Image (cartoon, rainbow, N blue to C red):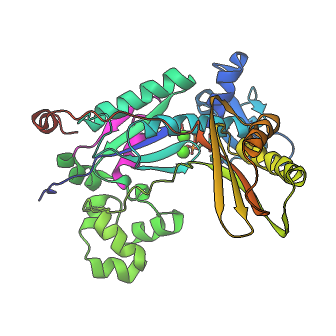
Amino acid sequence: MSLSPPFRKIIHVDMDAFFASVEQLDNPSLRGLPVAVGGGGKRGVVAAASYEARKFGVRSAMSGIMAKRLCPDLIFVPPRFDRYKEISNQIRLIFHEHTDLVEPLSLDEAYLDVTQHKKGTPSATLIAQDIRETILKRTGLNASAGVSINKFVAKIASDINKPNGQKTIPPEAVLSFLETLDIRKFFGIGKVTADKMYGLGIFTGADLKKHSEDFLIENFGKSGRYFYQAVRGIHPSEVKPERIQKSIGAERTFSENISSEIFLKEKIDALAEELSRRLKKNKVSGKTITLKLKYSDFNTQTRSKTIPYFISSKDLILENALDLLYQENLNNSVRLVGISMGKLNNEKATPIKQLPVSVQLHIDF
Ligand code: DCP
Ligand code: CA
Ligand code: CA
């Protein structure tokens, strides 16, 4: 039996030893050394371990004390989440250059559906290669990737040649790959389920496949159906894209209408402060400022300007928002004022180039 087309092309990308690699990137004296992020103090827990530390058996979620025992020279570094978030944003921008179907699973990993590729590259393997090279070039960090027909197989595949590697399981190889797979690799199989499976003589995908759907549901409830399908290469879960935010804003409605620009100026000052805080929290800045005025007669007016550089500071937002305010006289008294920032530096225009169909059919995965 084999799977039949059409197939989706799914890539799972995951950064290598993410937090630890970032620390080694930013502090060259840590490179080549066993590093643990977190784990300091009496009750600390290791969040990430560099590959040098893993040789000693140091792992995520291990107590710092245990880690130090395994690796006496281990260097503990406190985490810097803002920095990890910043890099996470950078890699997401790279993903979006290839497809808008990007589903982030955490700061350091995402699924991409590249069945329809923005740049028209037919081979998902080459796209994954390109993404990893771009990540390295722009961030200085290594990523690994898995490529296959669904999220489940792509995710398992991304671990196979980690670190700094990738693996493609093409459609014709999916079923045999799943048959040889250790059942612990199936999502949702923790220690309890695994022990139960072992008790039933199920150790690999092939063992799992011998059982009927009813049998699996009887023993594992709803997950039984999932196991039954997954081992047959059926995992229809779509890549659910996060929305890229197009603008960020702040606004106020007043209990009493305001007819003087002097009072409005005060309100806009507070809004500029709030908007700046939100932009910084999201680690973005923008070029287009919009002032929105809703009048007491419920007419709404918006005034916009685009400046040639990205801003996020309160002072610059305020300066530009006030420019917009003084641009024209008020039509009426104002019941709501808002300012928002658009053209954020989290968007990137990408030209769509389509390759001839014959080429697309030639290299499939
Ligand atoms: N993390 C954490 N606590 C955990 C597991 C992970 O804080 N229990 C953080 C630190 C990791 C990051 O999330 O660097 C990504 O987790 P991964 O599971 O992807 O592990 P790594 O990226 O560290 O290593 P690998 O190369 O195996 O992907
Ligand atoms: Ca990772
Ligand atoms: Ca991860």
Is 319 colored magenta in this rendering?
no
Q: Is residue 274 above or below residue 89?
A: below
In percent of width and height, residue 328 lies at 72, 46
Q: Is residue 191 visible?
A: yes
Q: Is residue 164 magenta?
A: yes
Question: Considering only vertical position in the picture, is 298 above or below 215?
Answer: above
Report the span colored magenta. 152-170
- Would you identify the image quadrant in which residue 207 lies? bottom left
* Residue positioned most to the top: 29
User: Looking at the image, which residue is at 21% across and 46% down?
Assistant: 173
Quarter for ligand 3? top right
Q: Position of residue 213 (x, y in %)?
A: 28, 77
* Drawn side of residue 294 relative to residue 88, left or right: right
- Tally of numbered tags: 0
Of 272 and 276, which appears nearest the observer?
272
In front of the other: 87 or 201: 87
Task: Out of 31 and 288, give the one closest to the viewer.
Answer: 288
Find residue 68 and report its horizontal and vertical position in percent.
Answer: 76, 35
Left or right, residue 194 beside residue 3 = right
With 33 as the anchor, is 3 left or right in this view?
left
Q: Is residue 105 depicted above or below 210 in this figure?
A: above
Image quadrant where one finds the C terminus: top left
Which picture quadrant has residue 88?
top right
Which residue is located at x 65 percent, y 39 percent?
Answer: 284
Where 55 sits versus 13, above or below? above
Please tell me which residue is depicted at 39% across the width and 34% down the height of the picture: 350
Camera sees residue 66 = no
**Where residue 149 sits: x, y (%)?**
28, 50
